[in-house]
């Protein structure tokens, strides 16, 4: 294992090297629909700006489940076997010659996207939109559900002492909520509606609270998800249906629950019904941020929204969010621990069970591997 580090709350973090004495690096490979197999994963050579990480916590995202079930997620199609996963944290085992901010044994959270740093979008600071982005577990780039990965050092962020490796892995989904709140300019005068109380809806709720939104209403079709949202700090919750004919009635319920104007709505589901509800519920001059991607194409009542100057904005992943996420966790302004509902080890049987659990819905929110 790693040189000189210790896992959370434990000793015996055995030393290892890359000279052949260590165990072969293994990873979870997506081979076909509903087919994952733990197989050897050869790593690239460590570059001068790279870091070798032994992963200890890896979460399953909804996009991982889409790839597992369909061999595609939106426009990203799996065409050949690949390693899956992109939410992760672990120990530094080795650093490249030019890496000065990390040493072996450091605990780090990994930002999964490697941008080109040369295109106009990267130069403008919008590197999340880089057309040459290589993102963990997004075809054709291999992911991080493995014993070890090699990753650029500038995308590895040292964890505060009071932040666990699991919480470090949760920086990835939390980053989506943080980026959404930044894009929508959420603040102390912004009343927020969150459509959808799945994992991304819940981290958006947590981010909106951290950004000091004075009132947050969460709507969902699932009673359990709504109860979790309430426990995490939603001021009110509203049960809705999947029937698009009920939008007007449900908008009235949302407005009543809010008790004041809806300034920003986040659609964290991404369906015709949820987006139509968000557009109709948002006050004149407000914003609707599309976060979820439930449907590849949407048919929406944009004319009435345009007449009220409701801005529609999108988000794609995130940018420059890890430092803020880690500070929110360190300061306890955000607590992601209640979102981790299931934990599995890294064996063939447990990997299969973990993906079945995540894909099955039920009471599962975040399924986490402890490697």
Image: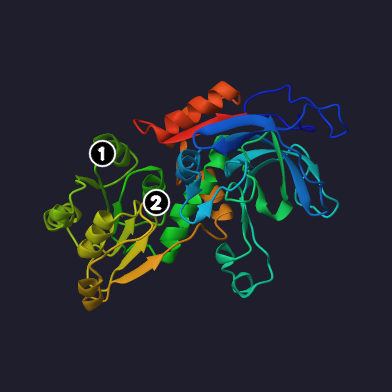
Q: Is residue 86 left or right of residue 102?
A: left
Residue drawn at point x = 68 percent, y = 31 percent? 39
Residue 82's label in the rendered image is: none
Q: How many marks?
A: 2
Residue 122, quarter of the rendered image: bottom right
Tell me where residue 182 sits by quadrant.
bottom left
Nearer the N terminus, badge 2 or badge 1?
Answer: 2
Front-lying residue, 331 or 178: 178
**SS of the residue under disc 2:** helix
In this view, the residue in front, 370 or 159, is: 370
Label number found at residue 204: 2
Asked if residue 17 is positioned above or below residue 249 in the image, the reply reads above
**x, y (%) of residue 239?**
19, 44
- Residue 222 is labelled as 1
**Extreme-right residue of the structure:** 19
Residue 215 visible in the snapshot: no
């Amino acid at each position: 294992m790693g040189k000189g580090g210790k896992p959370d709350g434990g000793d015996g973090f055995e030393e290892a090297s890359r000279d052949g004495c260590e165990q072969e690096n293994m990873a979870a490979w997506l081979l076909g629909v509903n087919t994952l197999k733990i197989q050897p994963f050869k790593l690239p050579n460590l570059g001068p700006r790279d870091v070798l990480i032994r992963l200890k916590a890896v979460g399953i995202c909804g996009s991982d489940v889409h790839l597992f079930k369909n061999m595609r997620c939106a426009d990203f199609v799996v065409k050949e076997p690949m390693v899956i996963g992109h939410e992760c944290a672990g120990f530094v085992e080795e650093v490249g010659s030019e890496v000065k901010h990390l040493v072996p044994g450091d605990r780090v959270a990994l930002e999964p996207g490697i941008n080109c740093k040369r295109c106009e979008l990267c130069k403008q600071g919008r590197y999340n939109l880089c057309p040459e982005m290589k993102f963990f577990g997004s075809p054709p780039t291999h992911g991080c559900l493995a014993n070890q990965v090699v990753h650029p050092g500038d995308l590895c962020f040292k964890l505060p002492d009071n932040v666990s490796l699991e919480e470090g892995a949760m920086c990835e989904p939390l980053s989506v909520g943080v980026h959404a709140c930044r894009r929508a300019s959420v603040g102390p005068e912004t009343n927020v509606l969150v459509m959808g109380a799945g994992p991304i809806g819940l981290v958006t709720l947590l981010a909106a609270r951290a950004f000091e939104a004075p009132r947050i209403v969460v709507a969902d079709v699932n009673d359990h998800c709504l109860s979790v949202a309430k426990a995490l700090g939603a001021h009110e919750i509203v049960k809705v249906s999947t029937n698009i004919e009920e939008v007007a009635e449900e908008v009235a319920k949302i407005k009543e629950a809010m008790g004041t104007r809806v300034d920003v709505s986040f659609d964290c589901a991404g369906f015709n019904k949820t987006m139509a509800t968000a557009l109709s519920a948002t006050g004149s001059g407000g914003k609707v941020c599309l976060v979820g991607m439930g449907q590849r194409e949407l048919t929406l009542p944009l004319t009435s929204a345009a007449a009220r100057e409701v801005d529609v904005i999108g988000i794609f992943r995130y940018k420059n969010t890890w430092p803020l996420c880690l500070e929110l966790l360190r300061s306890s302004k955000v607590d992601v621990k209640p979102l981790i509902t299931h934990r599995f080890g890294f064996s063939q049987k447990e990997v299969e069970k973990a993906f079945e659990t995540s894909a099955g819905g039920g009471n599962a929110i975040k399924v986490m591997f402890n490697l």
